Amino acid sequence: YKPLQAKSPNALTRATAFLHREYEKTWYWWEAVELARKLVLTGFVLLIPEERAFLRLVVATLVCSCYAVALAAVRPYKRVGDDVLAVATSLVLLLFFLGANWTTIYLGIEERHPDSEDAEAILGLSSLD
């Protein structure tokens, strides 16, 4: 970190420049946060048993929402366009998980009450006719 702050690169900072080049100097470590988020969403969430699929979605939604808020607050990238794009893609992923949660809730209600219109009424999906 000291060579980055002093703007006197050494062999290590030059060799790892691809990891921190796009970030502000104080946020040089943000790539590790990004990789941890990806690892949690693609790996650790699968450690939750398949019978608890809704819990997987909830954990993924929480991780995405916390990351989106942190990304919007911190703005770690040097270029504003990169910050905007990162927040936008994070929000799209969050919306995807929210939609998956909504669908899972709908299917769970339909499974428990197959002959009623409870799912549509509870989730606000009743027909307009």
Image (cartoon, rainbow, N blue to C red):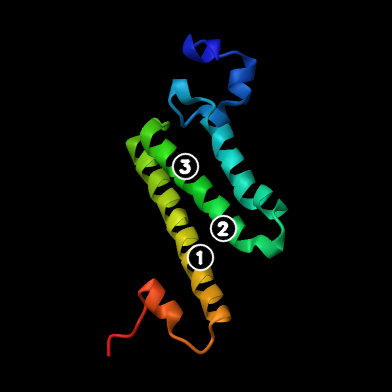
The reply, left or right, for residue 117 in relation to residue 16 is left
85 vs 111, left or right, is left
The amino acid pointed to by label 3 is: Cys
Coordinates of residue 22 in the picture (x, y in percent): 46, 32
Which numbered disc covers residue 66?
A: 3
Q: Mark 1 packing: few (<14 Cα in 10 Å), some, or many (20+)?
A: some
> Position of 48 compared to 7: left or right?
right
Amino acid identity at mark 1 = Ala
Residue located at (47% from left, 25% from top): 27
Residue denoted by label 2? 57
- What element does badge 2 sit on? helix
Instruction: Using the numbered discs, state the Cα–Cα distance from disc 3 to disc 2 in whole angstroms.
Output: 14 Å
Q: Position of residue 98 (x, y in %)?
A: 46, 60
Q: Residue at x 59, y 46 (%)?
A: 38
- Asked whether disc 2 touches disc 1, contact meaning CB atoms under 8 Å apart, the reply is yes
The residue lying toward the viewer, choosing from 104 and 39, is 104
**Would you identify the image quadrant in which residue 34 lies?**
top right
Q: Earlier in the sequence, mark 3 or mark 2?
A: 2
Q: Residue tagged by mark 1?
A: 100
Q: Are marks 3 and 2 in contact (CB under 8 Å)?
A: no
Compared to 129, does 62 lie above or below? above
